[in-house]
Image (tube, rainbow, N blue to C red):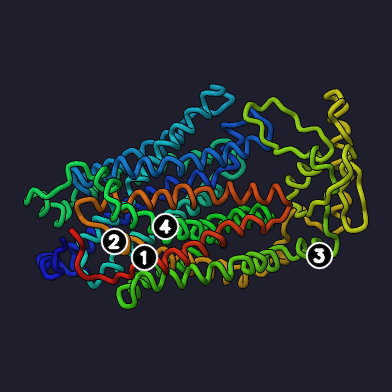
Amino acid sequence: MSIPASSTAELESVGSPEMRRIIFASSLGTVFEWYDFFLYGALASIIAKRFFSGVNETSAYIFALLAFAAGFAIRPLGAMVFGHLGDLIGRKYTFLATILIMGLSTFLVGILPSYETIGVSAPILLISLRLLQGLALGGEYGGAATYVAEHAPADRRGYSTGFIQVTASVGLLLSLVVILACRYGTGANFDAWGWRIPFLFSAVLLGVSVYIRLQLNESPLFKRMKSEGKLSKTPLTEALGNWGNLKIMLASLFGLTAPEAVVWYTCQFYALFFLTTALKIEAITANLLMVIALVSTAPLYVVFGWVSDRIGRKTITMIGFLLAALTILPIFKGLTHYGNPALETAAATHPVTVIADPAQCSFQFDPIGKKVFRSSCDIVKSALAKSAVPYSNTVASRGSSAVVRIGTVEITAFDGRLLDAATFKAEQAKFNEQLGKALSDAGYPAKADPQAINFPMLLLLLALLGVFSTMVYASMAAWLVELFPTRIRYSSMSLPYHVGNGWFGGFVPSIAFALVSATGDVYRGLWYPIAIAVLGLIVGTLWLRNTKGGALPM
């Protein structure tokens, strides 16, 4: 069942004050939710020190990434809970609840005592708050997208929801700007206590957003269905129990939301991670570069949303997947070339190879923080990982000590498994000094030289990544809304969106980091988003229909 576009004639046109208020209120609240969510990722290295200091350094950073990912992992549950409520009691009150949960959880992170103060309770409480954030975000997007789309004129639905799509980038941008301001304002104290200010600032944003959302009215389509007694009594069961609807949800997951998510997170969030860790560009400089790139490309969400009203949602999205799959790898290699040319030169002229017995090489993650990785292979790889030096692997004879080869220079690592703590520490310091000198002599920089950075080219490449992320994300809200019926729309579109973004996209940093750590290839992690983008291109082309306005199914 569908309702003709003409039956929405009572709605204001997209340029009217009422429609502008609807778009502004929905978008502003979603910006604040993304701001809250991205703060954690941008400050992961500091949070690792403050809340996971009871474990070794490698485990602490992995724990910090996993805590970041935990917020993504629970998003599908939030989609089910709040999607069900949104179809049952209405869009307005549901996404009012989500922003309250998100804002309060973020504020509490800002006042949460560190590990040094309350011990293991600190990381437990932190992860609990991250789970609440993820739960809230799981209900936010579906509510905002559905609310705007159900108000918008049929021929401007892509354009109108484009403002919702821009919120993720604006939220990331806002988090980076606030962090930069706090870094400058608190100086050397930022790592000690200044990092808390961006979290506390969320209380102000929460108050503004709640006030604005309280002024909104319920979606006209929802009110009509409620007055006619046509609301679903069990929307989640109906969404998942109807095979025809479930097929569309699965096609949306693998053909749209999952590939969109990995492309978006790779082009924006992982790009920043790559600049600071792999290329060793100073954090403030990298954040400023990303801010400029985000500002320059953010309007394209609305532009591509408008284009999708003309040529269809599927067309613009599939082109974005294709371009991303073909160019992500060369673009990231370009970031290395223009961001840290000394590193690129050193890797080409003096490649690093780890020659080791695979049986001695561990996955260096210790959940309880008691294990010390002392084999010769672990010692070599730990030192190279901390220096962010790319390397390849060669299998050595069984039982032999690991050797790191830098060009033609070879350094044999020591086996520390039978050494006492004092002797191990002394041998490790000696080895690290020897390795550091060899890397320095081979031209490997300790950090990127600001004088050697080609800023215009870096900005151009980051902007290109921004274009891809806008192409695949801009019309997604309109497309999802047009694929599912009003009575179960909130539930149906929220679940594939948050499985795709929470599980496939949210784990991009963790999966990429694991692939890089295991192989030593700084570009190996990019094969994950490339593979998922190709999957989306195939599934989306074959099993998703193109839409561009018209009647909304009831």
- How far is disc 2 from disc 1 in space, using C-alphas? 9 Å
Q: CA distance from mark 4 to mark 3?
A: 38 Å
Of the numbered discs 4 and 3, the one sitting upstream in the chain is 4
Residue found at x 68% / y 68% = 338
Give the mark nearest the N terminus, 4 or 2. 4
| Relative side of 216 to 281, left or right | left
Q: What residue is pinned by disc 1?
A: 544
**Neighbours of disc 3 within 10 Å: few (<14), some (14-19), many (20+):** few
Which residue carries the number 4 mark?
257
- 209 over 468 or under it: above or below: above
Residue to which mark 2 is pinned: 483
Nearer to me, 79 or 120: 79
Earlier in the chain: of badge 2 and badge 1, it is 2
Q: Position of residue 29 (x, y in %)?
A: 32, 51
**In x, y percent, where is residue 39?**
48, 46
Residue drawn at point x = 30 percent, y = 68 percent: 158
Residue 276, image quadrant: bottom right
Q: Which residue is mark 3?
A: 348
Question: In 3D space, how far apart are the residues under numbered discs 3 and 2 (Cα atoms)?
Answer: 50 Å
Query: Mark 4: few, some, or many residues within 10 Å (few <14, many ≥20)?
Result: many
Which quadrant of the figure contains the N terminus? bottom left
Q: Depth check: 176 or 232 in front?
A: 232
